Image: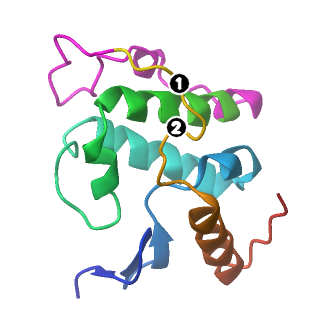
Amino acid sequence: MRAARLKEGFIYDPNEGVVMRLWHQDLIPLLPRQQLLGQHREVTALRGLGWGRRHATVDYVFHHCPYKLFQFHLLVMATMRERGYHPDPAWYDPLYRGRHCPPYEDLVVEPLTDPIYPEHDASYLQECLENLAGKGIHLTI
């Protein structure tokens, strides 16, 4: 059975249950190890061959310049480093897209906004908190 869309930001995967593609940015520093490292894997996939591949839970990302995803990834990697993980230094280059994808030749630098993605609003934060609670992870903002 393939993954099915539930509501904005969520999918149902028969192997993993309800999963989130990108967590709200305010939750990144609070995520448990598994979710933080999973977020890194998700972002690297989106920065690479996954860029532009339509998926109901991440389509909003493609409405923005890829530099926004780089900014979001910097937040994820900063949290990883604070916890003693060592992401591949190549990911700190905004043009890098992974080993299997050619780098961008040029990328417009966008100003950092808060939130990075306007879709990551209070409602999205609540959805993320509920998703985590469903996994037995209770975070307080």
**Residue 96, image quadrant:** top left
Identify which residue, 7 or 103, lies in the foreground: 7
Residue at (48% x, 16% y) in the render: 89
Q: Is residue 88 above or below residue 63?
A: above
Q: Position of residue 8 (x, y in %)?
A: 42, 72
**Residue 13, image quadrant:** bottom left
> Residue at label 2?
116
Could you tell me how far apart the alpha carbons at marks 1 and 2 are, in whole angstroms?
6 Å
Q: Position of residue 40 (x, y in %)?
A: 49, 42
Q: Tell me the crowding category of disc 2: few under 14, some 14 to 19, or many 20 or more residues within 10 angstroms, Cα based.
A: some
> Residue at label 1?
112
- Quadrant where the N terminus is found in the figure: bottom left
Give the number of callouts: 2
Amino acid type indicated by mark 1: Leu
Mark 1 touches mark 2? (CB < 8 Å): yes
Amino acid type indicated by mark 2: Ile
Question: Which region of the structure is painted magenta?
Answer: 80-108
